[in-house]
Amino acid sequence: MNDPKDDLQHIRQMMERSSRFISLNGLSGVAAGTIALIGAAIAYWLFQQHNIDYFSGSRYTYNAALEWKLILLAAVVLVLAVGSGILFTIQKSKRNGLKIWTSTTRLLLTHLLTPLIAGGLFCMALFYHGLFGLIAPATLLFYGLALINAAKYTFSDIQYLGYCETFLGIVAAFIPGYGLVFWALGFGVLHIIYGLLMYKKYK
Amino acid sequence: MSIIEKLNKDFESRVRLGIMSVLVVNGWVDFLEMKEHLGVTDGNLASHIAALETKKYIEVKKEFVGKKTKTSYKITRNGKDAFVQHINALGRLLK
């Protein structure tokens, strides 16, 4: 007869392995966070190039050239951050001999992407109405909710990152004019901290 | 000896334990996915699945995807009860 302890461990392992996406790599978070921080620094530099003191508190009307540069920067940061995240995760799944594209991955992605896409469209509406100050809080808020929503399909720890992002988004909504700072905190610092913790825990 | 009796002989093999574990937390799971989760050969998996099906612990669905058949499995009410009982018996053995 098998050792009951081994049997129970085997059962738990099979349940985990088949229902949660466990290839998410902590280093993905660190890489995404670092890229976000670099992006925030470049954005700050762009403001200075256009003679805007971001922290002066006074409001400027951004000219179209700066606006486009910022949008382009945001797009590049997004692609690089998501790309590096995927790269490290694929690496980990290969190392552990796990397949990436499973029904669990599909479940994880649908639960992550539904709030994210809704949030993205909502931010476009804010942009359309000229409510630029609410875009950064809204991105943090929807991203946080997306993480909470997806947490049951991967390491459940990710829900705590979700709560932090959501909380930060709400705080940011009440303190207008510091979107860049909250972005750097939420997408940069929080990702790096979370990534390092996860890397240590699930290496 | 009463505790040992509650352990289900049908779940003695590791492969069967694996199949039941995967099915108890998922809906329909197809053969290929199951094979990947368990890391066993086709023949080995098929024979254990057949045994569990005979016992009515799992139900089987065959469908066409293009020209290929896809076979999926789902745990039955019966199978879930039997498996939960088995887990409880294992837990009691540890005490």
Image (cartoon, coloured by chain):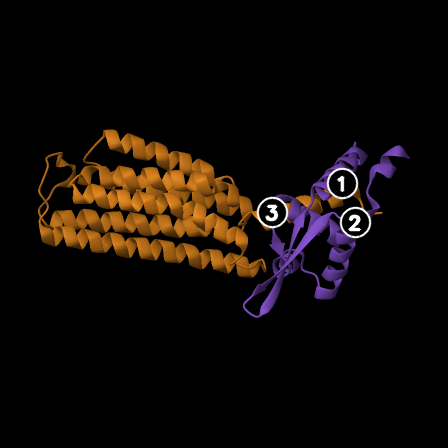
Chain colours: A orange, B purple
Q: Crowding at label 3, few (<14), some or many (≥20) Cα neighbours within 10 Å?
A: some
Query: In the image, which disc is placed on residue B26?
Result: 3
Q: What percent of the width, then of the height, locates residue A193?
A: 41, 42
Contact between labelled residues 1 and 2, with CB atoms less than 8 Å apart = yes
Q: In the figure, B4 relative to A67: above or below?
A: above
Give the residue type at disc 2.
Lys
Q: Is residue A93 left or right of residue A126?
A: right
| Circle 1 chain | B
Marks 2 and 1 share the same chain:
yes
The residue lying at 76 percent from left, 40 percent from top is B82
Question: Position of A14 compared to A153: left or right?
Answer: right
> Residue B37: x percent and y percent?
63, 56
Residue plotted at (19% across, 46% down): A44
Dot 2 corresponds to which residue?
Answer: B55
Relative to B43, say whether A117 is above or below.
above
Quarter the C terminus of chain B occupies: top right
Asked whether the residues under marks 1 and 3 belong to the same chain, the reply is yes
Q: Which residue is mark 1?
A: B82
